Image (cartoon, helix red, strand yellow):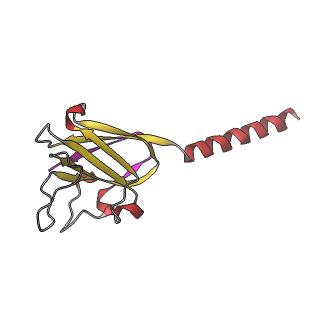
């Protein structure tokens, strides 16, 4: 009987730990290089593959440049998964990426893995990073 209780307790603990691991979230720290101004805000969009092409965000951040610590910020509670990050330096604080008449950005922007796109944002697979624990990624914003 004691062995049965021990086995059941062990099985329950294992199942509970497994369920917890599936719901675990982690901090995602983004280190920025290339900031040319201390004005404005940094806006970030963290997307799964299914939301990336729709310009949807699973996680967002808006941080005043003056509030950055060591040119980095952290988005808390990001679920385990594969994400691409789009980020831009909103110099005038209007909360949108300003573009010229041809749609070319007039404000500095970047993507995770420093991926580049041709006539648009980079492909998800080029910008994708894995979050499966506390994660830090470096992005050069241009």
Image-based side of 81 in relation to 100, left or right: right
Q: Tell me where residue 102 appears, x and y as whole percent.
A: 12, 68
Image-based side of 99 in relation to 77, left or right: left
Q: Which residue is drawn at 16% across and 56% down?
A: 98
- Residue, far front: 94
Answer whether residue 50 is magenta in the image: no
Majority secondary structure in the magenta region: strand
Q: Which residue is at the front of the view, 46 or 10?
A: 46
Q: Which residue is drawn at 47% across and 48% down?
A: 80
Which quarter of the rendering shows the N terminus? top right
Q: Tell me where residue 86 appears, x and y as whole percent.
A: 28, 54
Q: Residue at x 41, y 64 (%)?
A: 50
* Span of residues in magenta: 128-142
Check the image and report above or below for 61 versus 105: above
Q: Which residue is drawn at 29% across and 64% down?
A: 123
Answer whether residue 138 is magenta in the image: yes
Q: Which residue is at the front of the view, 94 or 142?
A: 94
Check the image and report above or below for 68 versus 107: above
Q: Which residue is at the front of the view, 99 or 126?
A: 99
Q: Tell me where residue 43 appears, x and y as whole percent.
A: 26, 47
Image-based side of 25 in relation to 102, left or right: right
Q: In which quarter of the image is residue 117?
A: bottom left
Q: Tell me where residue 42 appears, x and y as whole percent.
A: 23, 44
User: How many discs mark residues in the rendered view?
Assistant: 0
Image-based side of 114 in relation to 9, left or right: left
């Amino acid at each position: 009987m004691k062995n049965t209780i021990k086995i059941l307790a062990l099985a329950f603990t294992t199942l509970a730990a497994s369920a917890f691991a599936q719901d675990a979230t982690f901090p995602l720290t983004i280190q920025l290089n290339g900031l040319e101004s201390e004005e404005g805000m940094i806006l970030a969009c963290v997307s799964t593959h299914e939301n990336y092409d729709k310009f949807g965000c699973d996680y967002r951040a808006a941080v005043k440049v003056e509030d950055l610590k060591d040119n980095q910020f952290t988005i808390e509670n990001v679920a385990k998964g594969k994400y691409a990050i789009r980020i831009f330096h909103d110099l005038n604080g209007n909360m949108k990426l300003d573009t010229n008449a041809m749609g070319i950005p007039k404000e500095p922007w970047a993507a995770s893995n420093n991926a580049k796109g041709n006539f648009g944002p980079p492909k998800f697979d080029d910008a994708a990073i894995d979050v499966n624990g506390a994660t830090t990624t470096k992005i050069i914003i241009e």
